[in-house]
């Protein structure tokens, strides 16, 4: 006879899958808030003393993770959810204003991948440092001619340009990169 503490392989797999689905939902919920909102939550927690110094530090860390679009650690996810639960209980307006102001599926114009666009993107990212080094190097090599403008390279560059647009890059026709 099976005890409650022992789970069958199917039950264990189902529990693990449910935990993974919940973790994915939590990540989306955390990343749905902008870094500015996380900063406001941190300041609110400090001023109102509803968040411990420990949770305030996590707000700062999560703001950076969201800004850089890097992976969240499991402990960061857990603490971020704790923070959001406290905020929803004590000051839901901090989150509601963000959700109301959030653009729904903002569309960016698709940029044609050409040397001028790539050069401007490289110059912009040198200043703003939004790309990971591998993506930046890829664009730099395209710009310098070390990589050819093949269809595959253009497709990859278009994907990187889309990331840059989400970070604030705007192509200006006629401007040349220095």
Image (cartoon, rainbow, N blue to C red):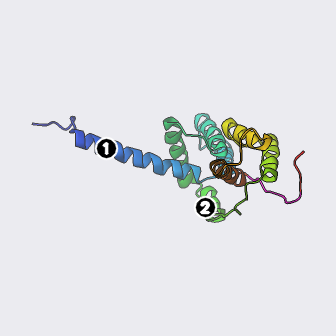
**Identity of the residue furthest to the left in this view:** 1
Which residue is at a point 61% across and 65% down the rendered structure image? Answer: 104
What is the magenta range? 168-174
Mark 1: few/some/many CA within 10 Å (<14, 14-19, 20+): few
Residue sitting nearer the eye, 101 or 131 = 131
Q: Is residue 109 above or below residue 129?
A: below
Q: Position of residue 59 (x, y in %)?
A: 62, 41
In the displayed structure, 163 sits above or below 131; it is below
Q: Is residue 27 magenta?
A: no
Marks 2 and 1, how far apart at CA: 31 Å
Q: Position of residue 6 (x, y in %)?
A: 21, 35
Instruction: Name the residue rendered at 24%, 43% in the picture.
Output: 11
Please name the residue that numbered disc 2 is placed on: 99
Mark 2 Cα-neighbour bin, 10 Å: few <14, some 14–19, many ≥20: some
60 sits left or right of 123 in the view: left
Q: Left or right: 88 with respect to 131?
A: left
Q: Which residue occupies the foreground of this view, 164 or 95?
A: 164
Q: Nearer the viewer, mark 2 or mark 1?
A: 1
Residue 169 on the magenta span: yes
- The quadrant holding residue 58 is top right
Q: Secondary structure at mark 2?
A: helix
Q: Is residue 125 left or right of residue 96?
A: right
Total of numbered circles in the picture? 2
Q: Which mark is residue 164?
A: none
x and y, in percent, of residue 92 in the image: 58, 57
The residue that disc 1 covers is 15
Give the residue drawn at x 75%, y 53%. Answer: 168
Magenta residues, dominant SS class = loop
Residue 109 falls in which quadrant of the image? bottom right
Left or right, 150 with reference to 83? right
């Amino acid at each position: 006879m099976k005890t409650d503490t022992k789970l069958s392989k199917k039950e264990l797999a189902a529990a693990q899958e449910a935990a993974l689905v919940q973790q994915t939902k939590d990540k989306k919920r955390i990343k749905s808030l902008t870094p500015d909102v996380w900063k406001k939550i941190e300041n609110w927690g400090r001023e109102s003393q509803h968040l411990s110094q420990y949770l305030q530090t996590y707000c700062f860390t999560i703001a950076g993770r969201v800004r850089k679009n890097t992976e969240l650690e499991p402990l960061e996810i857990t603490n971020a959810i704790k923070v959001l639960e406290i905020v929803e209980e004590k000051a839901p307006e901090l989150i509601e204003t963000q959700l109301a102001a959030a653009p729904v599926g903002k569309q960016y114009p698709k940029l044609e991948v050409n040397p001028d666009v790539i050069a401007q993107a490289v110059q912009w990212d040198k200043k703003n440092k939004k790309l990971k080094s591998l993506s930046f190097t890829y664009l730099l090599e395209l710009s310098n001619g070390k990589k050819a403008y093949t269809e595959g390279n253009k497709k990859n560059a278009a994907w990187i340009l889309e990331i840059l647009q989400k970070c604030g890059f705007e192509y200006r026709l006629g401007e040349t990169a220095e």
